[in-house]
Image (spheres, rainbow, N blue to C red):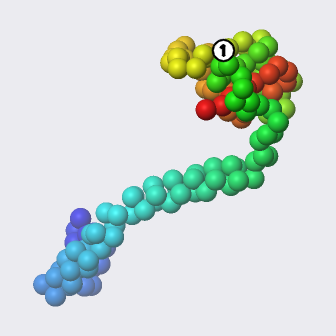
Amino acid sequence: MSFGCFVLVNDTEVLDSKRAFVALSLFNILRFPLSMLPNVISNVVQTSVGITRLNKFLNSEELDLDSIEHDPKEPSPLVIENGFFSWGDASEPILKNINLQVPKGHMVAVVGAVGSGKSSLLSALLGEMNKISGRVNTYG
């Protein structure tokens, strides 16, 4: 393709073996860097996204340490009583009137459809959601 363009565009120059071998050598030298260019671009984009996420995380507000209790005298290690939770400062609670008690030594599976609040429930137990009202106790 390159040699064909050279012959068509350039009427005064002749494509001799010297030019052809120099061009082939140059193409061979550039083959690896040009094949790596899409990977480099992809990695730069991924790095940019990662930096943006890290910046958002590091500049976010600290969790309210008083939103959950850690009382080891509680008979159950995981307790939510009449819990209302929202994400951020949203006025409308995402989780409403949640009551949960997991006895010591029991295993629990949180199962539900996409968007039903499984991750929000676990975030509420960790104190990552804004607790509007209720009581949360975790230990262990």
In this view of the protein, can residue 6 be seen by the observer?
no
Name the quadrant containing residue 133.
top right
Outermost residue on the left side: it is: 17
Q: Residue at x 39, y 58 (%)?
A: 39
Q: Residue at x 26, y 77 (%)?
A: 29
Q: Residue 113, percent across and down?
A: 54, 14
Q: Is residue 94 above or below residue 44?
A: above
Rendered-image quadrant of the N terminus? bottom left
Judge left or right: residue 73 versus residue 17.
right
Outermost residue on the bottom side: it is: 18
Q: Residue at x 74, y 30 (%)?
A: 71
Name the quadrant containing residue 127.
top right
Q: Residue 74, percent across and down?
A: 71, 22
Q: Is residue 58 above or below residue 83?
A: below
Judge left or right: residue 102 versus residue 15.
right
Q: Is residue 135 above or below residue 19?
A: above
Pick the residue in front: 139 or 136.
139
Q: Residue at x 16, y 82 (%)?
A: 21
Q: Is residue 61 above or below residue 112?
A: below
Name the quadrant containing residue 75.
top right
Q: What's the amino acid at mark 1?
A: Gln
Residue beneath label 1, please?
101
Q: Residue 112, percent across and down?
A: 54, 13
Pick the residue in front: 1 or 53.
53
Determine crowd level at label 1: few under 14, some 14-19, many 20+ residues with C-alpha closer than 10 A.
some
Q: Residue 110, percent across and down?
A: 55, 17
Q: Secondary structure at mark 1?
A: strand
In this view of the protein, can residue 44 be seen by the observer?
yes
Rendered-image quadrant of the C terminus? top right
